[in-house]
Amino acid sequence: MGYVQEARENHVKKKVEEALRSKMKQKALKECDQYTSKYAQCALGRTLSVVWACRELAKELNGCLHQYTNDNVLEEMKREYMLQQDGKAPAGV
């Protein structure tokens, strides 16, 4: 694959990229719901102490979220979007 073709596949309009980021975040929150719930329970009724009292739960939540919200995931979503736009794959975005 040439540089121009690869650049075209990775280039999407800003609004499309924002929509893909939003979709990526929604999926991450759905996949990490158990961690979100545990963190929310820990944080309930706390103010400043949430920082140290829920530190481990926050690390677990962030670790889970990072699996679904990183540059590699976004680039893959962009590639899928471009393939859909070219008619090579069924629509799903």
Image (spheres, grey):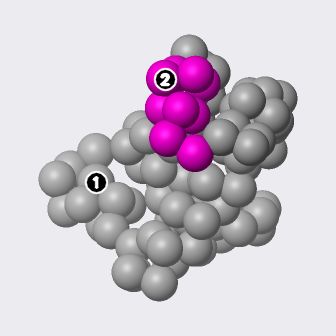
Q: Which residue is rendered at x = 39% and y = 81% of the image?
A: 13
Q: Earlier in the sequence, mark 2 or mark 1?
A: 1
Q: Horizontal placement of 66 versus 34: left or right?
A: left
Q: Which residue is rendered at x = 28% and y = 54% of the image?
A: 6
Report whether residue 63 is seen: no
**Label annotation for residue 6:** 1
Q: Amino acid at mark 2?
A: Trp
**Label annotation for residue 67:** none
Q: Horizontal placement of 78 versus 25: left or right?
A: left
Q: Which of the image's four quarters has the C terminus?
A: bottom right
Q: Range of the magenta residues?
A: 47-55
Pointer 2 residue: 52
Tell me if residue 19 is in the magenta stretch: no
Instruction: Between residue 26 and residue 45, name the one nearer to us.
Output: 45
**At which x and y percent is residue 49?**
53, 32
Q: Horizontal placement of 39 versus 80: left or right?
A: right
Q: From this viewpoint, which residue is outermost toward the left?
A: 3
Instruction: Between residue 3 and residue 21, name the one nearer to us.
Output: 21
**At which x and y percent is residue 86?**
56, 71
Q: Secondary structure at mark 1?
A: helix
**At which x and y percent is residue 19?**
57, 73
> Measured along the vertical axis of the image, is residue 75 above or below residue 53?
below
Nearer mark to the viewer, of 2 and 1: 2
> Measured along the vertical axis of the image, is residue 2 above or below residue 11?
above
Instruction: Between residue 9 and residue 38, name the one nearer to us.
Output: 38
Q: Secondary structure at mark 2?
A: helix
Instruction: Between residue 40 and residue 64, name the one nearer to us.
Output: 40
Q: Amino acid at mark 1?
A: Glu
